[in-house]
Amino acid sequence: MATSATLTTTHLSTFRNILDEWHQNRSKTTPTKGFLVPFEELQQSSKKDALKDVIVAFRTRPPPNEAAEKFHGDPDAQDAAETEAASAAVEFCSGITVTSAEPGVFFAHVPGMKWSGPTLTHKPYEADLAFGPDVGNEEVYQRTVVASDILSLALSGGVGCILAYGQTGSGKTYTMESVEHRVARDLFDQARMVGKRLVLAQGGAQASDTEAGDIFEFNVTFLELLGKHATDLLESTEEVDAQGNPVRTAIAVREDKVGNVRPNLISSLIRTSEELEELINKALSHRRTSATLRNATSSRSHALLTISIKNKLLPYADEGQLILVDLAGSERHEDSKDHDKQCMEEARDNNKSLMNLKECVRAKAKMAAEDGFVHIPWRSNKLTMLLKPIFDIESRQPSRAMIIAHVSPHIQDSVHS
């Protein structure tokens, strides 16, 4: 029987002893595996395996001190001094162990309770990659976005999608904002390289950087999906709600007559990395947040940054798309029990959309691995409708999805993980 976070905290010293024994026994027989190519050699490596349509990476972050302390205070403490003493007496205990970086394997240490006392169940999970708490944002970006050639795919008329998924407070927004800014840094350099190759392939002379860069036209939209309500993060407004969040015009999310899902959003023409950086910062400053048990400024919504790429040298070619999605956090009842009615409804809608997304991802992965027809239920939710370009089996555009699944490091969260 799994335990609650409060009960887990009560028996934390026992769980730590069990975990130490597990680590000692495992280290004698099975060493931890690292990445196949060291980070220092990654950019020089020419190794390119056949890339899958869906690539999954785990990431767990180091625990911030203030986050760790939220689990340590005695819920029955009568005053702040008693709570502080209880916090100091108990150290952080990890609920996650990465045992292989590539292929990715991590163990979730799930607390339980039997008649004989506390127990730990060590459950293994596998993915393509696994990033421990010591791996920085640049390495995550290089091993996911760069290694999977997502920018090149979008510049070649395909659809590349990067999604950050995980529990509230597990580090999704931290990862995705770093990815967005690194995409802004690299996209135009990559476009010049691809442009030069296209000019040569068309029989032209060697193109300059300026000429190669002018081959592509970039248009950017930024949508926020909060519960069932979509808004435009690039819309300027001075009206705010009771929580101080801006009030924006509702945006309809539906298919048009020819089957495209294109909400009526402000589309900004971007010519440089600096312009894209500025637009990202502007949109992120408009995103709705609210205080939760885990985060004083938690992002309560899905945020979708879409970069549409038109090839002016090949005007009849499909437009490429780069879709970067910072998903709202998944929440258990324990995470949302202190929410007001509106936040509880939003959390319920977010969890439902994440469940629909999971079904679509599983179906897409199954379609790539098996022969025969596989139904992908992308029409079941507004979130998956917005991601139609990567889920529509009738699309002629190649697509690739990189999912970075974030796992909380706390043993109190391992049941959720």
Image (cartoon, rainbow, N blue to C red):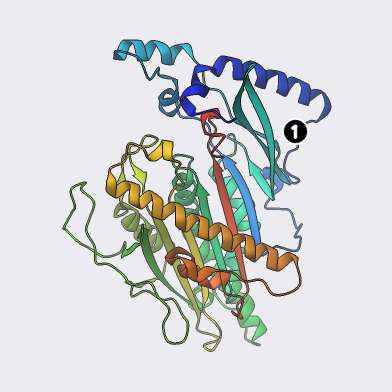
Q: Is residue 5 above or below residue 180?
A: above
Q: Nearer the viewer, residue 182 or 233?
A: 233
- Identify the element where label 1 is drawn: loop
Give the image location of residue 232, x and y in percent: 31, 65
Quadrant in the rendering for residue 291:
top left
Q: Is residue 44 above or below residue 213?
A: above
Query: Which of these two is toward me, 109 or 100?
Result: 109
User: In the orientation shown, which residue stands out farthest toward the right?
Assistant: 29
Q: Nearer the viewer, residue 221 or 271?
A: 221
106 lies left or right of 88: right
Kindly give the residue lying farthest to the front in the view shown. 115
Task: Name the residue at 59% across, 69% down.
Answer: 376
Location of residue 349 (image quadrant): bottom left
Quadrant holding the N terminus: top right
Neighbours of disc 1 within 10 Å: few (<14), some (14-19), many (20+): few
Q: Residue at 67%, 83% (x, y): give it.
A: 201
Q: Position of residue 359 (x, y in %)?
A: 58, 60
Q: Is residue 327 visible?
A: no
Query: What residue would you read off at disc 1?
Result: 32
Work out whether 157 lies above or below 276: below
What's the residue at 44%, 42% (across, down)? 168
